[in-house]
Every structure is written in C-alpha cells, then in structure tokens.
Image (cartoon, rainbow, N blue to C red):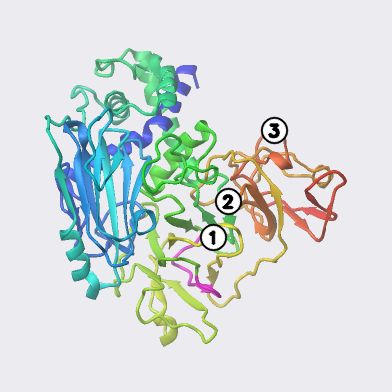
C-alpha cells in the first residue's frame, strides 16, 4: 500500500462516524425509521410502539419507546421542555455530528421532574432564561435520542401522554437554517462519494481543536479543499482513494469484530464503547478518567467501531451493554442449536435489564411467532425458580416444556448475537463482583468460572475495543511466558489480536483504575512489552492458568507461583 493509500485508509476510519451518522440523520428526515415517521429538523418524531423487525437500525432496543429529533441549531437556539414522569425511567441522549454523547436529560442525569433546557449551537451568546438549563451542542447539527421505559402494550398510552407533553420550539430571533451540506453531484462512485461527504461535512461541522489539527494531515487527499477535487480526480489520487476506502472499511469491520474490550464468560463487555468523547461534557455526562479515554488515537478507532455496531448508544453509566457471538465453549452461536442462559442472580440495576436478540450480519431484531424480541425483568409470564434464578431458552422453535416455553427468547435459524442491556447499572456491574453467565448448549451444564481474583494497578489508557466475535482457533502473535510473568511484566502490549482461551486467567479493568486478574478470560496479543503496573486499560486477556499466588519482593503485584501457558 502506498503512503497516499494508507493516508486514505486512515481518513476513512477517522471520518466514518461523521459520514455514517449524518447519512442516518438525513435518512431519518426523509424516510423515518420503522415506527418513527420521517420528520423535518427541529421536530420530534414519536414511536407509538416498541421497536420490532421493521425498524431496520443497527442494534435498536426493544425495551423503550423512542422519541427522536434531528436538530439544526444553525438558525438559532431551541427550547426543550420535558414533563414530570412520576419516577418513570427515561433518557434524552444528545449526540453531535461526530457521534459524541455530549449531554443527557432523564432520570439518572436530571431527575424525573418537569424541566426546561435551552439548546444552543456553536458560537451562541445570549441570556439563558431563569429556571432553564443550557445544553451547548458542539456542532450545529445534532440528534436527540429519547427513550421512555415501557412495561408493554398496556403501558403505551401513558408513554404517549408523556411524548405529547414533550415540546421542542424555536427560541429568540431566528435565521435561516443551513441543514446538511450537499455533496458535489458530479462525484461518481460510492468510494469517492464517501470522501466527498467527508470533505463537505468536516467543513460544516468542525470537531474539537485537537482533531482539527489532526485533520491537516489529510490535505494531500483533497479533504481540506473548499471546492470538490473528486468529480474528476487525477488517476493517482483516484486510485489511492479507492484503495484507501476498501482498506479503511476493512479496518472498521475488523475493529468492530476484534479487539481488547474485556470479556466475561464469552460476553464482550462494551461498557467503555462510548468513552471516546474527550472534549464536550454537558449536563448528565461524567468527565472522569473512568469514562474518558486518555488517548485520541484509540478514541478515533473506538468511535468508528461503535458507530458501525451500535450507533447512538449510551455511555456505560447510563446503560451498560454486553454482547456475545459465542457460547460458553467458544463456539459461534447459531440457530441450528438450542441454548440456555441461566442467571443465578439477575443483573444488578437501578432501572431495568433485558436480553435482546439480533440477527447477523445486520444486527436487526428477529421476527418470530410470539413477537418477543427481548426478555428481562419486565417481561410478563417468565418462570423463575424457587431460588430466584432465571433460565432463558434461546432457540428458533418453541420449547415443548411449558416452563421453558415461558422463558423462550426466539433466535433466527442461523447465526445470531444477543445483547444484554443494564439501565442505570449498579457498581457491581463494573467492579467485577457480578458475573454474566455464558450461553450454554441445551442439555449441558454452564461453565462456572473459578472465584480467584487478584487486583493490580493500571493506567487509564485504553486500547481499541473489539465489539464483535473473536475467531476460534486463531493464535495470538505472542503469549506470556511464566518466567516473564514472575518478574512482574507482560510481554505483550495488546492491540486487539484475536484468540480464544477457555478457562484462562484474564485481566479486567476496574472503575477505580485497578485491574482484576480473573480466571475465565481470553488472550490477545500484540507487539512490544509493558510492565504489569502500566498495562493499558481495556487490554488484558493473557491466557495463563494460576494455581496460587505470591507477592514478589518489592512489588505490590501478586504473581503466580505455578503457571501453564495455554494456547488456542
């Protein structure tokens, strides 16, 4: 790959969230999204039902009723009024053009009393009315993604009343709105059109200052030009852009399906998947090391992967997401096999939780004869055991046993991916004291992880998160050797190379900056060498079996006395 092609691939990864997000914003205003009718900028579209298979949006939830508004603040501010929900969970998530979650309004963030919020665009200066909270958007175009908790069809009327009491109106003097910039019509081909959209949207919606500086490196690609260079580009540039588009797209897909996000019993813990906003912290956001990546290069890759696999997802402190493509034995989940998912203890949350079923590769909800797309603590008719445990049955056909049928979550006949959502998760979700159960092939006992835990200090720097499945049987580039571990060092600086190692010890980041060394993880490898005390946050899947531990002289790290390096 030439230098120019490599630069084009880098630009694709950087610009994918902006292009993809605003394509969805434009689609929403023209076509809507399932039960959400198409609506012009600065108006709400309210869903009248919970989402279903007709709502073709990646990883859409089936827990809440949506209210969405696409904002254009270039003409002036908007005044948002929300009603008193009487304690009902809801969240209005504010997303800028680059997919940064820059503010939240709702039960966790601002409470459930009625409130007023002034939404302003870049450069606005004026007086905020008394009793009103200002929310400053980093870009003139942004989105409100609203979610209302709904107990089911009988609760829809109450949700509808809350939607109708929600108001979005112009505030103060108005100018003409700019909308989305139009790409040059003469640009031909989807690959060149991508870069044309990126060029126009970068100019219309400047990012944070540090990213504006970073963008200067893309000048040789024509991305900083005021007029389009892509309607009739030189042959060399055209070739570089087309090759870079292909390579960049592959990188985004790879980042989506590989990486070093922590795992627990096969579940990818995407709790940090939306921590890439480093600059804009409005009401309801948490600007703390636990929830903000310290490295911009990492943040850009994670932002692209998150946009691809879960556009408009919340920060983990609002809703924690976990997803799996594999059963507890590491085999890909497929509808040709029946599975059970047994919660000895249901997820610890202050709002509610659910498991939602999605097909592959689209990540859409799965049509089924009972119209059940998710199951959780609000699903009527579930059968709990006397000890409070809950076993969900994941399979395409209705189970014959009545109790199993009551807990049936239908799967497609082919590959699938369930997602566990925990709204307002409690600390146990993040500190390692609550363990997610693995999906187990029906008729087999679920694999139970050992309980040995060791914690060590770690930095707050993150590596790219893999939000997808690892490839079974693929070897990591390097593996830790016992002698090196006993010296208190790790031989790999992990960067998301895939592998799977059952029943192996893994390092998992905790919210207080420590790492928890926990059996049952997976290994990933990379280049370089790092001391254990500076393992980067979000890496840590080293496959070692540990029987017992000791503390090395002069070190705060407990070391394994006997280890067995396990390779896939």
Query: Which residue is most to the front?
Result: 130
Mark before the other along the chain sequence, 3 or 1:
1
Residue 496 on image: x %, y %? 58, 42
Q: Nearer the viewer, mark 3 or mark 1?
A: 1
Q: Main secondary structure of the magenta part?
A: loop
Residue 136 visible: yes
Mark before the other along the chain sequence, 2 or 1:
1
Label 1 SS: helix
Q: Nearer the viewer, mark 2 or mark 3?
A: 2
Residue 207 on image: x %, y %? 36, 28
Q: Which residue: 22% across, 32% down?
A: 126
Q: Are marks 2 and 1 in contact (CB under 8 Å)?
A: yes
Task: Categorize mark 3 by other alpha carbons within 10 Å: few (<14), some (14-19), many (20+).
Answer: few
Query: In the image, which disc is placed on residue 427?
Result: 1
**Residue bearing mark 3:** 528
Residue 528 vs residue 147, the one in the foreground: 147
Magenta-colored span? 332-346
């Amino acid at each position: 790959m030439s230098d120019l092609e490599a630069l084009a691939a880098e630009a694709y990864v950087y610009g994918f969230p902006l292009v993809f997000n605003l394509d969805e914003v434009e689609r929403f205003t023209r076509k809507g999204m399932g039960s959400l009718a198409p609506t012009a900028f600065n108006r709400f579209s309210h869903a009248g039902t919970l989402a279903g298979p007709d709502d073709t949006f990646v990883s859409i939830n089936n827990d809440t009723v949506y209210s969405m508004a696409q904002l254009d603040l270039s003409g002036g501010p908007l005044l948002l009024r929300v009603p008193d929900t009487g304690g009902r969970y809801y969240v209005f998530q504010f997303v800028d053009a680059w997919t940064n979650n820059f503010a939240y309004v709702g039960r966790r963030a601002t409470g459930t009393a009625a409130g007023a919020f002034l939404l302003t665009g870049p450069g606005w200066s004026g007086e905020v009315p008394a009793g009103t909270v200002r929310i400053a958007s980093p870009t003139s175009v942004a989105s409100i993604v609203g979610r209302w908790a709904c107990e089911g069809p009988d609760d829809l009327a109450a949700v509808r009343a809350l939607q109708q009491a929600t108001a979005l109106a112009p505030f103060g003097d108005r100018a003409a709105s700019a909308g989305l910039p139009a790409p040059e019509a003469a640009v031909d081909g989807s690959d060149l059109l991508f870069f044309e959209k990126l060029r126009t949207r970068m100019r219309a919606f400047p990012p944070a200052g540090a990213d504006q500086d970073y963008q200067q490196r893309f000048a040789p690609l024509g991305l900083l030009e005021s007029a389009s260079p892509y309607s009739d580009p030189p042959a060399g540039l055209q070739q570089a852009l087309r090759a870079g588009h292909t390579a960049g797209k592959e990188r985004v897909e790879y980042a989506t399906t590989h990486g070093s996000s922590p795992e627990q019993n096969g579940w990818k813990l995407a709790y940090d998947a939306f921590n890439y906003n480093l600059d804009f912290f409005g009401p309801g956001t948490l600007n703390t090391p636990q929830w903000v990546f310290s490295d911009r290069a990492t943040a850009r890759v994670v932002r692209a992967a998150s946009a691809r696999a879960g556009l408009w997802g919340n920060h983990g402190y609002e809703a924690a997401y976990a997803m799996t493509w594999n059963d507890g034995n590491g085999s890909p989940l497929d509808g040709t096999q029946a599975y059970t998912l047994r919660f000895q203890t249901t997820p610890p949350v202050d709002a509610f939780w659910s498991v939602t079923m999605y097909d592959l590769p689209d990540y859409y909800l799965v049509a089924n004869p009972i119209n059940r797309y998710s199951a959780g603590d609000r699903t009527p008719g579930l059968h709990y055991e006397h000890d409070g445990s809950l076993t969900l049955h994941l399979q395409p056909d209705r189970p014959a046993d009545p109790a199993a049928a009551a807990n049936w979550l239908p799967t497609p006949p082919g590959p699938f991916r369930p997602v566990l959502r925990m709204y307002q998760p409690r600390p146990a979700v993040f500190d390692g004291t609550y363990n997610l159960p693995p999906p187990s092939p029906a008729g087999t006992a679920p694999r139970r992880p050992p309980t040995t835990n060791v914690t060590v200090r770690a930095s707050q720097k993150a590596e790219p998160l893999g939000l997808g499945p690892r490839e079974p049987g693929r070897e990591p580039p390097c593996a830790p050797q016992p002698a090196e571990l006993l010296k208190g060092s790790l031989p790999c600086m992990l960067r998301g190379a895939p592998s799977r190692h059952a029943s192996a010890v893994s390092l998992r980041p905790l919210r207080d900056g420590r790492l928890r060394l926990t059996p049952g993880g997976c290994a990933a490898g990379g280049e370089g060498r790092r001391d254990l005390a500076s393992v980067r946050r979000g890496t840590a899947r080293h496959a070692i079996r540990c029987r017992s531990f000791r503390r090395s002289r002069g070190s705060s790290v407990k070391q394994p006395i006997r280890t067995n390096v396990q390779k896939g």
